[in-house]
Image (tube, grey):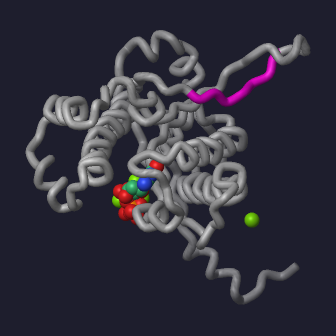
Amino acid sequence: MAKSNFEYVRDFEHETRCLPNTWIVVRIDGKGFHRFADLHDFVKPNDTRGLTLMARAAADVMFEFTDVIISFGHSDEFSFVFRKNTAVFNRRAEKLSSLVTSLFSSSYVFHWNDHFPDTKLRYPPAFDSRIVLYPTDENMKDYLSWRQADVHVNNLYNLSFWSLVLKGGLKPCEAELKLRGTLASDKNELLFQEFGINYNQEPPMFRKGTTLLRKSVDFLGKGKRTIVMPYYCDIIKKDFWDTHPELLKQGK
Ligand code: DGT
Ligand code: MG
Ligand code: MG
Ligand code: MG
Ligand code: MG
């Protein structure tokens, strides 16, 4: 068939290929989840229903994209790490980023009722995404450590803040003032002295975020099945990578 006169518009299209031999990280983050969480009565500061729904949607992304070797999330965000030499969609950045995000979003909505059986979804949530490339294993591990360190900082602050507001009767601005300039040790002390909370005994999911790994397990004696397993452990220390040596090997 002859080409139409309009064919030339294709030449305006532009695609970005991710650099070869680099870890590809796609990170999604909920748009305006401050409001979304309020409107849907999320428990403050951590709502187990919301966190497990995020992990459920992330697992769907891992079922679809088998080159994701590890994902990590907390709050309204999740990071997906594709193995260094993945050839999925010829490493086209827009394809990867848009498909991960749209699958994540639709899965979040799809499974909403299972996690929030008594809460009607008030509007369709949206997620943004970005792609970051990391050339070395060390860079990629540091990226994940950075995200987990963020969980710790935010969670300690949010728990202190909401304890002061919800249990201590402080106004939000008073709680903010009280916490300004405090160190982690001060917040630990405040939680313990004023509210009897031992921070280290808070649920690991809240303190450490959710790490999803692919694991091969025996399936009712009918051979091996690969499943996506949640872990709520430290991923900053070297120990994590020693315990799961296959990650960096699969990652190549
Ligand atoms: P953005 O990402 O710039 O569009 O704006 P936000 O509002 O999504 O801000 P972000 O991503 O920095 O922070 C996540 C917000 O989501 C934060 O305000 C608290 C809320 N959120 C996430 N998980 C929970 C939860 O389990 N419980 C409650 N109450 N809020 C949560
Ligand atoms: Mg933000
Ligand atoms: Mg957000
Ligand atoms: Mg966020
Ligand atoms: Mg098409």
Spot occupied by residue 152 in the image (x, y as percentages of width and height): 32, 35
Look at 21% across and 36% down and name the residue there: 194
Where the C terminus falls, by quadrant?
top right
Spot occupied by residue 32 in the image (x, y as percentages of width and height): 43, 66
Spot occupied by residue 211 in the image (x, y as percentages of width and height): 52, 31
Residue 184 seen in the figure: no
Relative depth, front residue between 203 and 245: 203
Relative depth, front residue between 57 and 5: 57
Res. 250 image quadrant: top right
Spot occupied by residue 197 in the image (x, y as percentages of width and height): 31, 31
Relative depth, front residue between 40 and 60: 40
Q: Is residue 225 magenta?
A: yes
The image quadrant where one finds ligand 5 is bottom right
Relative depth, front residue between 171 and 147: 171
Name above or below for residue 181 compared with residue 116: above
Residue 183 seen in the figure: yes
Q: Residue furthest bottom?
A: 5
Name above or below for residue 247 compared with residue 211: above
Res. 88 image quadrant: top right
Number of marks: 0
Q: Is residue 183 left or right of residue 248?
A: left
Highlighted range, magenta: 224-230
Name above or below for residue 206 compared with residue 10: above
Q: Residue furthest right?
A: 222
Look at 40% across and 62% down and name the residue there: 34
Q: Is residue 33 left or right of residue 142?
A: right
Look at 54% across and 61% down and name the residue there: 15
Res. 139 image quadrant: top left
Which secondary structure is most common in the magenta stretch? strand
Where the N terminus falls, by quadrant?
bottom right
Q: Is residue 90 magenta?
A: no
